[in-house]
């Protein structure tokens, strides 16, 4: 069975995010006028109502702020993916505004815990689609017990 794993249908506001993923780059949107980060992408700034959003490349690291492991599938087509850890990641460098819903790489679900540091990995899930996923960031040397999510990762 051919399983379709696709993001939400890109719209005019989110297209730059999905295009960057295809280049294996994680980007975030902020206001071109006041500089405030925002997520999900949108045309107008919720703070100053300006248009002109700008996109900036991010380090691709973050902290798990929510986690759930799906252990039962309501659709047999997804049964082979179980257990599937769904995580919410507060992305570094966005003042806490950008929280992505994603998943951990296979085999890491026992470590899907709030506070764990993670790093983005881009996975080709179809011939024409690359999605951001995350892996536990062992290189950070941080087991998550002291993470505040405010540490900014070095830029590239
Ligand atoms: Zn603004």
Image: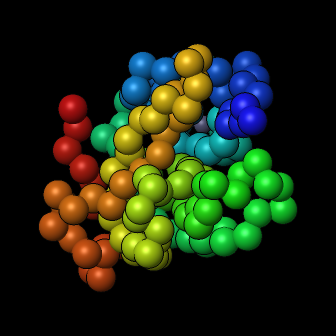
Q: Position of residue 23 (x, y in %)?
A: 42, 19
Q: Measured from the top left, where is residue 43 in percent x and y?
A: 72, 27
Q: Position of residue 22 (x, y in %)?
A: 49, 21
Residue pictured at 36% horizontal, 54% vertical: 135
- List x then y, in percent, for residue 110: 44, 75
Apparent side of residue 143 relative to residue 62 in the rendered image (left or right) = left
Q: Residue at x 20, y 44 (%)?
A: 154
Image point (25%, 75%), residue name = 143
Residue 53 in view? no
Look at the picture and state if 39 lies above or below 104: above
Q: How many marks?
A: 0
Image side of residue 116 versus residue 14, left or right: left
Q: From the viewer's perspective, is residue 139 above or below residue 5?
A: below
Ligand 1's quadrant is top right
Residue 63 vertical position relative to residue 9 in the rendered view, above or below:
below
**Residue in front for this viewpoint, 144 or 108:** 108
Q: Nearer the viewer, residue 97 or 85?
A: 85
Residue at the outermost bottom position: 145
Q: Nearer the viewer, residue 60 or 38?
A: 60
Whether residue 3 sits left or right of residue 140 in the image: it is: right
Q: Quadrant of the C terminus?
A: top left
Residue 84 appears in the rendering: yes
Q: Quadrant of residue 141?
A: bottom left
The answer to whether 32 is drawn above or below residue 134 in the figure is: above
Q: Quadrant of the N terminus?
A: top right
Q: Is residue 36 left or right of residue 59?
A: right
The colour mode here is rainbow
Residue visible at 64% across and 21% down in the picture: 15
Taking the view exactly as shown, the residue that stands out farthest to the front is 1
């Amino acid at each position: 069975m051919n399983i379709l794993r696709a993001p939400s249908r890109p719209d005019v506001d989110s297209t730059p995010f999905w295009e960057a993923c295809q280049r294996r780059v994680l980007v975030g949107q902020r206001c071109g006028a006041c500089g405030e980060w925002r997520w999900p992408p949108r045309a107008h700034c919720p703070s100053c109502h300006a248009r002109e959003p700008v996109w900036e490349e991010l380090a691709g690291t973050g902290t798990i702020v929510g986690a759930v492991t799906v252990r039962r599938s309501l659709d047999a087509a997804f049964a082979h993916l179980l257990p599937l850890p769904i995580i919410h990641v507060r992305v570094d460098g966005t003042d806490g505004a950008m929280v992505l819903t994603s998943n951990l790489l296979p085999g890491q679900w026992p470590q899907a815990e709030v506070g764990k540091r993670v790093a983005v990995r881009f996975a080709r899930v179809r011939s024409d689609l690359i999605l951001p996923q995350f892996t536990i960031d062992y290189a950070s040397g941080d087991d998550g017990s002291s993470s505040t999510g405010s540490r900014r990762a070095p830029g590239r």
